[in-house]
Each structure stands twice: as structure tokens, then as C-alpha cells.
Image (cartoon, helix red, strand yellow):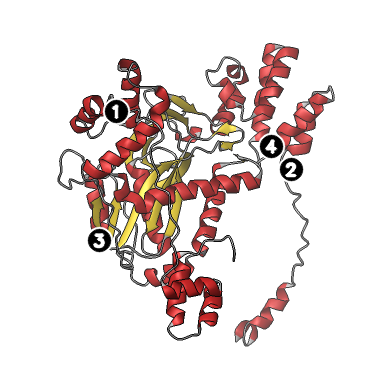
Amino acid sequence: MSGKYITDRQIRLYMTLRETSLQEVAAAKAGISVSSAGRIDNGRHQLKQTKTRRRTRVDPLIPIWDSVVLPLLKEDPEITPIGIFDHLCESHSDKFSSSSRRTLERRIKQWRHLHGANKDVVFMQEHPLGKLGICDFTHVKSPVTINLRPFKHMLFNYRLVSSGWVYTQVTYGGESFAAFSDGLQNAFAKSKGVPREVRTDSLSAAYKNSGAAEDFTARYQELIAHYGFIATRNNTGVAHENGAIESPNRHIKAQLEQALKIRGSYDFNCRADYEAFVQTTINRRNKRIANKFKEEQRQLQSLPSHKSVNYSQEYVRVSRTSTINVKRVMYTVPSRLVDSRLRIHIYDDHIDLFVGCELTYRLERIYAPGATRKRSVNYKHVIDALVKKPRAFRCSQWRDELLPNEDYRTIWAYVDATMRADDASHYMVRVLHLAGKADNEMRLGRFITGQLRQGRLPSLFDCQERFDIKPKDIPNIDVMQHELSQYQSLIPGGRHG
């Protein structure tokens, strides 16, 4: 024990043990020597003298603290130490050295603890089962692509706060009411119940935001009445009031990013594949709180018998070019609909076309940001008409968009460079016509480009032999004709019975 200081804790322990134990036993248990124990008993033990920390240099803030820094701190509570530091370096460099930055920051922090204004306090909340569901939109920064093309999208996140159960849906058109309503209703359906309260931030799709009152939009008011929940929102700009969803937003995006890294690729074949990937990731997350969710699920309000409206409705007429215009986007539609008047239901991710009350077609929705315009062209909608006049293909405004993928753009570049203009157009149109039959598009494109790499362009006859739909042979059926006399046996009593 020689050379080691005895701590206050050892002394207290020894004195406690000494009340019921011999000196030697108490000293051994306290980890001190018997001689030290004797000095403690006799009151002769000297405590360790701690050195008083003293300043070893002159305070560098003396010339400017009272005259410059304090007036700034008192005048504006929001001013930052960096702002004061920059001011001192610029205007008082003769009295203040830039090497004293850390000293300045510590001194300002200490002064604010002693004399500064009161700060906001976060009050932890209790959330009863089935009471609160909270939702929000969040941007995805991961470089996700669909067929190597950048995929712009957001996530709609809904969370049952008590259990932590999460529903996430990929959205395409920003924070629109269609995306909000569809995501919220799907979340209710997935959880098989409705909480008593639903909280959001100040979504313009749900609130008019014209004043302090809870002034809902007409469509959100209808949604509230249909599901029977109380709608609330947090104060604008106060992020921690929405903390029950803001923090999960970050966690979900981080989890998706890690899952994408493990997958080894950010590219997906189609939207459906990416949506399924997101759902699988969220399902794994929800498994961890399955028991809590079951408890909360029993406290949710029951669902109504049907969903509320989650789309907007318009009427459009199909032009002679077999197109319609919706939200600054031109869509081609099947040519059979030319000159018809359609009722369209506009959802977040698709558009339904109705002739009268009958759903006739569904389009994937495209978004045109800002004041831009876009086109969505599907060659299958117009190929039957184009086959009748193939020369129209060459100078068509949609020519490049009629080609469905890179294989067909390669084919067109080749035939356009090696064949007469009319022959090239005829070849390309016939290939597209064949591609639209029986889902031959991918296989036919790969077949022709594979032949081109070998220096040979397959003829239309070769393509048709390989990919055209061949009618099935009608089997010959031999029917045996019964003798007429045999039918008499079916009549009771014969002819005169």
C-alpha cells in the first residue's frame, strides 16, 4: 500500500466497518494498511492536499468583455459566439487575438447559463393505446433508379405512436391530397383500425392555413367525417412537436439506405419492384414491435365499410391524335377511344379512364414539375393505326418516344442509316407491331440487337416466324351418329305409348 493515497471512500468504508469489526479486519476490507488504520483511529491521518488550480496567464478577454461582448449578449439573445468572434476579429483585432476563440465560446456559454434568458423545455408525453396516429411526408435522398433512370419520389409515413407500428407508402406527386388521402386510408386498412386522433404538420392539402383556427379543406373534412377521427396539427416551425414521426422518418430512410447497400444496387425494373422492396423493409421493422402493436390494435376504432374518395375527377375528350391532356401532361390512349368523352379519376400514381360508368383503361401517372410539360407515349395505343401508314413514323413528333427502350432505338438507328427512308419506316413499324403482340417486346428487341451485333439484320419474315402468334390447329373430331331407331327406346311405350 506504500506510496498510494488513501481515498475518502476508503476512509468512510473503514470507519463503517470498524464499528463491528476488529481493526485488522476492517483495514483489510477497506484496502488500507493496519498502520494507516491506526492513524485514522487516533485522528492523526492527514488528508491528501489537492492543488488549487490557478490561472497561469492573463485573461485575454479583459480588454473587450465588459465593453464589447456583454453589450452584444444583452442586446440580442440570439447572437452566436461565432458572430461575436467574427466581429472582434474584424473591429477589435488590436485588443483580441483569434487564438482565444475557445476561451470566448466557453465564457459566453457560462454567462448565458448564469444570466441568459430561459429556454424552451421539451415535455415528455404519455400516449395511451389507440389514441394517436401521426403522419408526414419525407424526401428520399438515396439515388434510386428505375431502368437506370433517376426516380423522383417521396415517402408517406404513418405511425401509431404508442406501439411504434409504421406504415410507409411510396408517393410520386409531392404532398398532394391524393397522396395524403390514399396513404392515410391504406394505413388505416393495413392496421385494421382508426386511432381517435390523427396529427399532421400544416399540410396545404389538409389545411387552408389562412389563420390560427383549424380550417380544414373540404376534402379533408369529408375524410375526417368518414373515418371519425379528430384531426390536429403541430405548431408551424416547431419540429419537436412532431418528433414522434420526424425521428422515425430519419430511421426509416437510414434503414432503407442500408438495405439498398446490402442489395448491391439502387436500380429496379419497375415501380412495383421498388414498392415491394420498401414494404419488405418496413415489415421487418414492424416485426420487432408485433406484440405492442397487437395490444394497440385492439384499442383502435373500427373501419367503415368502404373507403372515402382519394382521387380528383375531371372530364376530357380524346383528340384525333388519340391523346388526352391532364395536369400539363399529354397521354396517349387506345385509339378505339378517339372522339369519346372520358371521365377520369386522378390518383397519386395512376389515372383511371371511364366511358360512362365502365372502367376502360388505366394509365401510369406522370408529373410535370413547375410550369413544364411532358408526354407519356405508348406505341401500343396507336400501332394498329400506324401500320396502315408507316411513312408517318419518320416525321412523327413522338417518333423517339414511340420506341419503347434502348434496343429499339438501336434498331431504328441501324435501319435508318442502312435502308431507304420508306423501307426503314416500314421495317420499324412492323417490328413495333409484332412487339406489341403477346408481350414480345423484350424478347424481340434482344433478338434483333443480338443479330445486329453479328452483322446481320433479321428479315421481317424471320421475326414473324419466331415471334408471331400462330393459330392453334383445330382438331378433327369424329362424331358417331346413332341410328334413329335407337331413339324409340327412350320413349315409354314406343311410338304409340
At horizontal 52% and vertical 29% (from top left) the residue drawn is 377
Above or below, 249 relative to 7: above
Q: Earlier in the sequence, mark 1 or mark 2?
A: 1
In this view of the protein, can residue 200 be seen by the observer? yes
* Labels 2, 4: front one: 4
Q: Which mark is residue 442?
A: 4
- Tell me, for residue 228, which label it has, or none: 3
Disc on the earlier residue, 4 or 3: 3
Q: Mark 2 = which residue? A: 470
- Discs 1/2, front: 1
Tag count in the figure?
A: 4
Nearer the observer, 390 or 49: 49
To which residue does mark 1 refer? Answer: 62
Q: Nearer the viewer, residue 80 or 102?
A: 102
Q: Residue 162: which disc?
A: none
Q: State the image quarter where residue 445 is shown.
A: top right
SS for callout 4:
helix
Q: CA distance from mark 1 to mark 4?
A: 78 Å
Report the amino acid beneath label 3: Gly
Mark 4, mark 3: which one is toward the viewer?
3
Left or right of residue 316: residue 362 = right
At label 4, the amino acid type is: Met
